[in-house]
Image: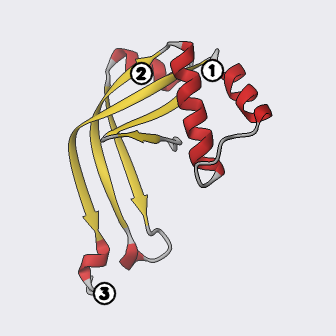
Amino acid sequence: MPLWYVRDGLTLLSWTFGKSQKVRNLERDPRATVQIEAGRDRYGELRGAMLECHAAIERDPARVTEVGLALARRYQGAGAEPPAEARAAVARQAAKRVVLRFTPTRIVSWDHRKLGGAY
């Protein structure tokens, strides 16, 4: 399922609702696979990475707010600080959310640009 994320070194951070099925699944089994792709418009530009990860769940409200704001900065564009009303909305949502920390244990990557158009 698609998730917005921010990087912390090789670790990926995301957030989701604390009562979601994915959180329940990760509580039972912390193994997860994350796939990141780029260049989807043309096959010859497709590249990406598959990360086999250990997932940890963080519930500290201050940390959840911090990651929520980092996501807002990344996805609203150019790392700009979100306006006050957006920051307030993130803080309100943080009470119902958790941070998912995906730490890779194995990484596999591919890059179709290296094929030089011969596939």
Check disc 2: other Cα within 10 Å, few if <14, some if 14-19, many if 20+: few
Check disc 3: other Cα within 10 Å, few if <14, some if 14-19, many if 20+: few
| Placement of 79 over or under 58, stated as above or below | below
- Give the CA distance from mark 3 to mark 2: 41 Å
Residue identified by numbered label 2: 25
Residue positioned 36% across, 43% down in the render: 34
Q: Please state which amino acid type lies under the numbered disc 2.
A: Asn
* Total number of numbered discs in the rendering: 3
Residue 42 can be seen, yes or no: yes
Place residue 78 in its image quadrant: bottom right
- Residue 2 spot, x, y in % from top left: 52, 44
Residue identified by numbered label 1: 94
Earlier sequence position, callout 1 versus callout 2: 2
Mark linked to residue 102: none
- Give the CA distance from mark 3 to mark 1: 46 Å
- Residue 21 spot, x, y in % from top left: 51, 23
Q: Are marks 3 and 1 in contact (CB under 8 Å)?
A: no
Residue furthest to the right in view is 85
- Residue 102 spot, x, y in % from top left: 35, 32
- Residue 99 spot, x, y in % from top left: 48, 24
Mark linked to residue 117: 3
Place residue 82 in its image quadrant: top right
Between residue 98 and residue 87, name the one nearer to us: 87
Earlier sequence position, callout 3 versus callout 2: 2
- Quarter of the figure that contains the C terminus: bottom left
Comparing marks 3 and 2, which lies closer to the viewer? 3
Comparing marks 1 and 2, which lies closer to the viewer? 1
Q: Please state which amino acid type lies under the numbered disc 1.
A: Ala
